[in-house]
Amino acid sequence: MRKVVVIGGGISGLSAAHQLLVKGYDVTILEASPRIGGKIFTMEFAGMPIDTGPDAFLEREPEMKELCSALGLAGELVAPVSQSAKIWVDGALHTLPKSQFLGIPLDLEELASLDLISPEGIQTAQNDFTNEDTGRHEDETVGSLIRRRLGDEVMDKLVGPLLGGINAGDPDKISLRAGVPYLATATDLDFSLIRSIKEFVRSSDRDPKAPVFLTHPDGLSKIIDALGEELKGKIVLNENVHSVVQEKGKWIVQGRENLEANAVILSTPAYVSAGILRNTNNEVAKLLSSINYASMAFVLFAFPSGAVEPFDGSGFLVAKSEGLLMTACSWSSSKWGHLGKDQKTFIRVSAGRVDDDRVFNLDDGELVSKLLDELSLMVGLKAAPSESQVVRWPKSFPQYEVGHTRKVEEIQKRLQREIPGIYVAGAAFNGLGLSACIRDARINVQKVENYLEKNT
Ligand SMILES: Cc1cc2nc3c(=O)[nH]c(=O)nc-3n(C[C@H](O)[C@H](O)[C@H](O)COP(=O)(O)OP(=O)(O)OC[C@H]3O[C@@H](n4cnc5c(N)ncnc54)[C@H](O)[C@@H]3O)c2cc1C
């Protein structure tokens, strides 16, 4: 029987292993920590299941929905009851324009009425309709496109905070095509960014009333638990793999024990995969370790019933220029119906981004206290929480900087040419959303199949 070892039990590794198992391969998953799920982790907090990593997935991408269907969970998924976010900029909370696409305003008259962008800023954005785009190039940053077409103000006060929130990144460094491919596609139809996106939205067959996100009311760990059941007996926990070496035409995966395999998928973070492959192929290891990661933390708050004024919306994003620790605030009990049923108020605050490690210089007590001060300033919240919990995610968000696509192609080329039978999958390569991770796992499973077909 053809043996495949998957290193890493996050969504990428688990979904790859699940597909391999369904296809009849002998598969083992080696996971360093005492639990599976990786970044997906639901904890019981103030009596409710609260996600401490991802808390939802994009509805428009099919892979997570397909996985939930295969696991019999699709009927249990829920959408947010409130999707209207706000933005904290210039020392005040502002409503986001209704007519926008990933933060890009599509109706400048509406934008002008919101008191968010100055008349000069609106005037600059108007030029998008008339000025030909001479500055386009294949691999540019999100920031360079938005600043060129709509001006610095729209970038700094609207698009930057929205897109920066996706990966704790800096949109002035993130590659448009690699980092936000959906936006890149939407901008290809006209030199005017606004006209192009409007055309894209008009021509896409997506139901405008469809929710943007879905989740499981028991938390996303419910999906991981169901996957774990399917993979029972195939998962080894507390197995910290340190290297993979070749011996007599087979791969030996080395941790506490050595495991022989015909093919190996590494679904560990890129810097971990780099360490595992260092002695096997130093060039691949160097490329993998050059993928930069951002660190951040979530702080969960529960407030007693009636202690906090209701919030009108799902939460808010914070512009970088404000200099605050907070990057976003999800008003979880307004956003999700299942959390709102409890009388308590649940709030999940994000802090830290790629060039801002201040949260890692604060202990938990200091972080909680500073974020409560910020909440007091922003929404006048004065009540003391009944519970709080800090969850730190060091080096957790891969940054798809300019040159990312070429780097990933180079990694794939070298793997295939120089160490065939070894594959890398996961958030570091072709999208970091949960569906993108499953998509990447599928691609790698297909490669494993092709390889084993020819070589065993
Ligand atoms: C805080 C946060 C919030 C997010 N929110 C969302 C969201 O709302 N929606 C969304 O779609 N995406 C979100 N994402 C992105 C998404 O969660 C991740 O990209 C995805 O979960 C990554 O999955 P993965 O399997 O590729 O990697 P991981 O989940 O990192 O899994 C890798 C696994 O490898 C294991 N491992 C590490 N080293 C070794 C070793 N030496 N040997 C064996 N095992 C090892 C780790 O313990 C881990 O279990 C978020 C990410 C973070 C960090």
Image (cartoon, grey):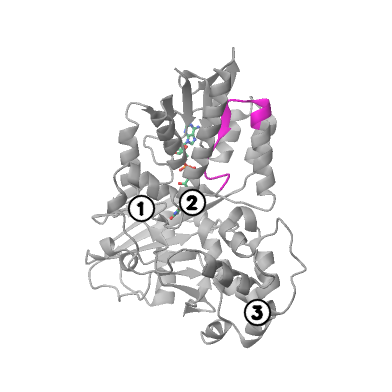
Query: Where does label 1 land, which residue?
Result: 51
The residue lying at 67 percent from left, 60 percent from top is 141
| Residue 208: image location, x then y, percent | 43, 69
Magenta stretch containing residue 418, yes or no?
yes
Which label lies toward us, 1 or 3? 3
Q: Is residue 237 visible?
A: no
- Contact flag, marks 1 and 3 (Cβ < 8 Å): no
Relative to residue 127, is residue 389 depicted above or below? above
- Tell me the quadrant of the picture where the N terminus can be found: top left
For residue 123, above or below residue 415: below
**Is tag 1's residue or tag 3's residue first in the polypeptide sequence?**
1
Query: From the Cβ of disc 1, is ligand 1 less than 8 Å away?
Result: yes
**Amino acid at the residue labelled 3:** Ala
Give the CA separation, mark 1 to mark 3: 38 Å
Foreground of the two, 441 or 397 = 441
Q: Is mark 2 on a helix, strand or loop?
A: loop
Q: Is residue 396 magenta?
A: no
Is the residue marked by circle 2 packed among few (<14), some (14-19), or many (20+) residues within 10 Å?
some
Q: Give me the disc on residue 125.
A: 3
Quickly name the residue at label 2.
433
Image position, residue 215 (x, y; %): 35, 55
Secondary structure at numbered mark 3: helix
**Magenta part of the protein: which range?**
415-430
